[in-house]
Amino acid sequence: MIDLRSDTFTLPSKEMIETILTAELGDDVWEEDPTVQELEALAAKILGKEAGLLVSSGTQGNLVANMTHLNRGDGVVLERESHINMYEVGGLSQIIGAYPHLIEGDNGLMDPKAVEAAFTRGYNVHWVDFKLLCLENTHNRGGGRIIPKENIDTLSKIAHENGASVHLDGARIFNAAVATGMDTSKIVENIDSVQFCLSKGLGCPIGSLIVGSEEFIHQARRNRKVVGGGMRQAGIIAAPGIYALNNMIDRLAEDHKHAKMIEKTLLEIDDLRVKPVDTNIAIVDTSQSKWTAADARDGFEKRGIKVTYLGDHIFRMVTYFGITQEDIQLVISAIPEVFS
Ligand SMILES: Cc1ncc(COP(=O)(O)O)c(C=O)c1O
């Protein structure tokens, strides 16, 4: 099977697994696991922030970061199709007690005017105060879209000028960095906290990191404990993470090349639409064609290829480490057969 459902299906390489065997371990709740500390320091350095914190998943990272920014009853401004809004079980509301104000984006891109309107509406006894802006880069449902740096900076400035903080769901921030050639720390320079995933394109089996100021991470560490995220010999998770940050970032360019090849072939089929592929995700819209997303999913499945069904006329194909050049050739030759 060639599994293009998600880059979360990436398997760790032998070299990555071997790092676990020699990792120096300790109790990380007591802050005595040297491998975790090394990973957290490395993550902070790469992202240009003061400190880092290992968490179990992207969802936990976003939750813990947002718990740290927000109090019960605070408002959060975020994009309607963001992962935090759509796929994190409403943690913002059910755990933090925060109120989400949703902005209608254009494939994940928020119009600064809409964000400004939310933050500058003034005081009214009936309204919540907006204390946080959440961004997502790359944007998953936007088709792995890279949010331009100017947009990030403009939105961050609006939030900061209005007394709010900015959190970035950077599950795939390195895809954005590699694709733009921009330093990751530069992309996030005006953002207060970032969550990024080790377990997607970087190929680790588990883990995400939050980075931010020393003070922020100190408080986030306590919030991580609240949600059961304090882990003991977590160096077995951190060692692959260190390996990934040192060895797995630049190769994301290969995944981007593969996704572009898929996009090009899909666009040769009349009436199929594909959200512009900036990185490693192709989201395909069949609504103008004679096929449904279920037809596409079944047609690919028959040919040994798995894609994600996202709705009646939407499906997704994602490239990642482990999807080889040969796999992509097979996918490319299957496309005209599925849509014939
Ligand atoms: C943009 C984005 N943020 C957060 C997450 C959550 O990560 P996890 O599955 O590790 O909880 C995902 C997962 O796919 C994602 O795509």
Image (spheres, grey):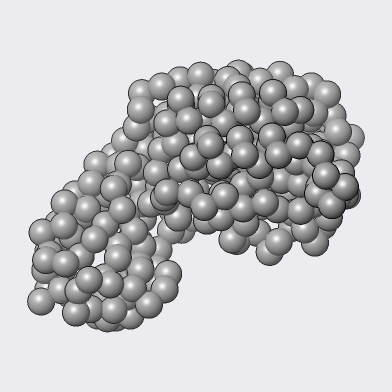
Q: Is residue 115 left or right of residue 29?
A: left
Q: Is residue 165 left or right of residue 175?
A: right
Task: Find residue 155 and report its horizontal and vertical position in percent.
Answer: 57, 31
What residue do we see at 51% from left, 19% from top? 186
Could you say which quadrant of the image residue 302 lies in? bottom left
Choose between 211 and 237: the one closer to the eye: 211
Choose between 20 and 40: the one closer to the eye: 40
- Whether residue 127 is visible: yes
What residue do we see at 19% from left, 79% from top? 290
Task: Find residue 167 and report its horizontal and vertical position in percent.
Answer: 66, 36
Choose between 39 and 69: the one closer to the eye: 69
Task: Find residue 337 and report its horizontal and vertical position in percent.
Answer: 12, 73
What residue do we see at 35% from left, 47% from top? 280
- Whether residue 60 is visible: no
Q: Is residue 251 left or right of residue 274?
A: right
Quarter in which the C terminus is drawn: bottom left
